Image (tube, rainbow, N blue to C red):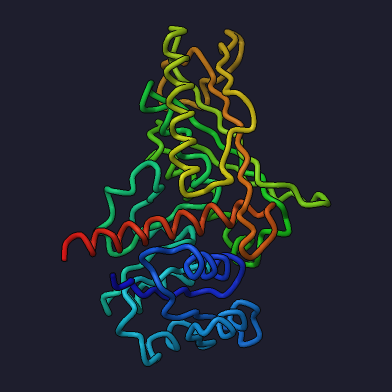
Amino acid sequence: MSKVKVAIIGSGNIGTDLMIKVLRNSDHLEMGAMVGIDPASDGLARAARLNVPITAEGVEGLVGLPNFDEIEIVFDATSAKAHVANNARLAPLGKRMIDLTPAAIGPYVVPAVNADEHLDAPNVNMVTCGGQATIPMVAAVSRVVPVAYAEIVASIASKSAGPGTRANIDEFTETTSEAIVAVGGARRGKAIIILNPAEPPLIMRDTVFCLVDAPDPAVHDEIRQSIEKMVGDVSAYVPGYRLKQEVQITEIPADQPVETLLVDGNRPTHQVSVFLEVEGAAHYLPAYAGNLDIMTSAGMQIAERIAQQKEATK
């Protein structure tokens, strides 16, 4: 079986981790190029040692590589602003783009929730690390009962946030909030990210709050079962993804002013609280960097599915 050749733009933390995953774990993908702009970057040096074609001249350098025509899928692990330019250059050349920045040019994709819906899209957006971790939980709740409001808090080790992540903080909150609605199914969404400077660095932690109208205790059991199934679906491609403690479903006190969080005036009855931990596979950075691992794992999962679909239609 022939593999689909891929290129990675961005030789930083996310791009390098993704490259190692493709080289070690992929059944349907092979590295065609690693692209950066810093000739001294560790990612380009590692790629060269692993016999992956490299260029330090950005997207133009990629287009100029001898094997460019063989590359079918391009991962973009740069920044939201850079992705706009990269997509404008590569889309007319027929390259499929998997966007690991918050640029959100293409549809939002969270593999455990909506992978099959966008396998033919020329550009798919992997939302954010916090979105990949938490949106499956919102979707798990919303497939049982409507979610009036969902709020997520992603806490990551400061050491795992490179320059690209730090440059994208505003886009992170906007893109994740929008995807909580578009993919998670909530009426309204909010996202918060915390860069935790603690030493030693802490593993990625995520908290999900959903406001729902669910007075029936039997529905609470359905919500818990739906969440547990979804955790299993995500952990199938992110092995370090797990519940940190039992799902909590609590009645909202009558004097708690939740109305300002809602789209309409229908007051929900209960709050669903989900507490997650994401441990990285330590392919490039230490295990605390689950935020990188879940992004690269999700991106590779979509590329694998695209490649499988291509093989099936031959």
Residue sitting nearer the eye, 29 or 170: 29
Q: Is residue 199 left or right of residue 124?
A: right
Q: Residue at x 73, y 59 (%)?
A: 159
Q: Is residue 205 left or right of residue 76?
A: right
Residue sitting nearer the eye, 91 or 299: 299
Q: Residue 237: where, in percent of width, then height? A: 47, 49
Return the residue found at the far left. 314
Q: Residue 152: where, in percent of width, then height? A: 56, 37
Return the residue found at the far front. 1
Tag count: 0
Q: Is residue 285 above or below residue 59?
A: above
Q: Is residue 178 above or below residue 186?
A: below
Q: Residue at x 33, y 49 (%)?
A: 115
Residue sitting nearer the eye, 259 or 115: 115
Q: Is residue 11 left or right of residue 266?
A: right
Q: Is residue 3 visible?
A: yes
Q: Is residue 267 visible?
A: no
Q: Residue 292: where, in percent of width, then height? A: 58, 57
Q: Is residue 93 above or below residue 223?
A: below
- The N terminus - image quarter: bottom left
Q: Is residue 206 left or right of residue 238?
A: right
Q: Is residue 239 above or below residue 13?
A: above
Q: Residue at x 51, y 59 (%)?
A: 296
Residue sitting nearer the eye, 4 or 137: 4
- The C terminus - image quarter: bottom left
Q: Residue at x 56, y 32 (%)?
A: 208
